[in-house]
Amino acid sequence: MTVTRLGDFLQRFRPGAVPGAPAAVPADYAAGDEAELDVVFAALADVRDACAAERSRGESRAAEIRERARAEAAAVVSAARQAAEAERARAAAAERRAADESETAVREAERTADEMRARAEVRVPAEVARIVDEVRALAGGPS
């Protein structure tokens, strides 16, 4: 007994034609498929339009958010620049105060040094004379 294969079995049901030139144009199965899908795509047209509208709203919203972010960033940069300028001014004022204090300290030190020199000029000759007298007295010489 031989087993019939499925392909051989189905071959029996293949349409047969009369020998010779074809009498009709073969069926266009692709056109049938396309017509069948037109109904599906037509039913999806509303969904496609809704998606396009949603995308458009999303793009508009994104543009608004970007613009707001740019404005906020510009405000932050402006505030930072103002703060930096104010800090520079405070630092410059502190530096000027420190320089003024240093100048005052130098002038005070110079004044003190001048006073000490003046006192030394007055006192040194008398002190030298006193010390010379004491040394002579210790050595037994004339005072």
Image (spheres, rainbow, N blue to C red):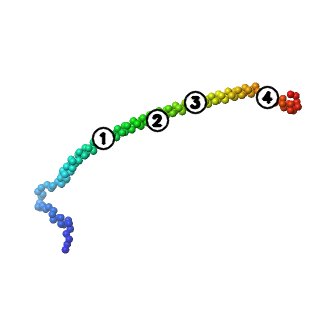
Q: Amino acid at mark 2?
A: Ala
Query: The residue tagged with tag 4: helix, strand or loop?
Result: helix
Q: Residue at x 86, y 31 (%)?
A: 137
Q: Counting residues from the N terminus, which is met first, the one under dot 1 or under dot 2?
A: 1
Q: Counting residues from the N terminus, which is met first, the one under dot 3 or under dot 4?
A: 3
* Circle 2 residue: 80
From mark 2 to mark 3, how far is it between C-alphas? 25 Å
Q: Counting residues from the N terminus, which is met first, the one under dot 4 or under dot 2?
A: 2
In the image, residue 62 lies at what x, y percent? 34, 40
Q: Counting residues from the N terminus, which is met first, the one under dot 2 or under dot 3?
A: 2
In the image, residue 45 lies at what x, y percent? 23, 46
Q: Counting residues from the N terminus, which is met first, the one under dot 1 or under dot 4?
A: 1
Contact check, label 1 and label 4, Cβ < 8 Å: no
* Circle 1 residue: 57
Quadrant holding the N terminus: bottom left
From mark 1 to mark 2, how far is it between C-alphas? 34 Å
Q: Amino acid at mark 4?
A: Glu
Query: The residue tagged with tag 1: helix, strand or loop?
Result: helix
* Circle 4 residue: 127
Quadrant holding the C terminus: top right
* Circle 3 residue: 97
Q: Residue at x 37, y 37 (%)?
A: 68
Q: Residues within 10 Å of mark 4 (few under 14, many from 20)?
A: few
From mark 1 to mark 4, how far is it between C-alphas? 102 Å
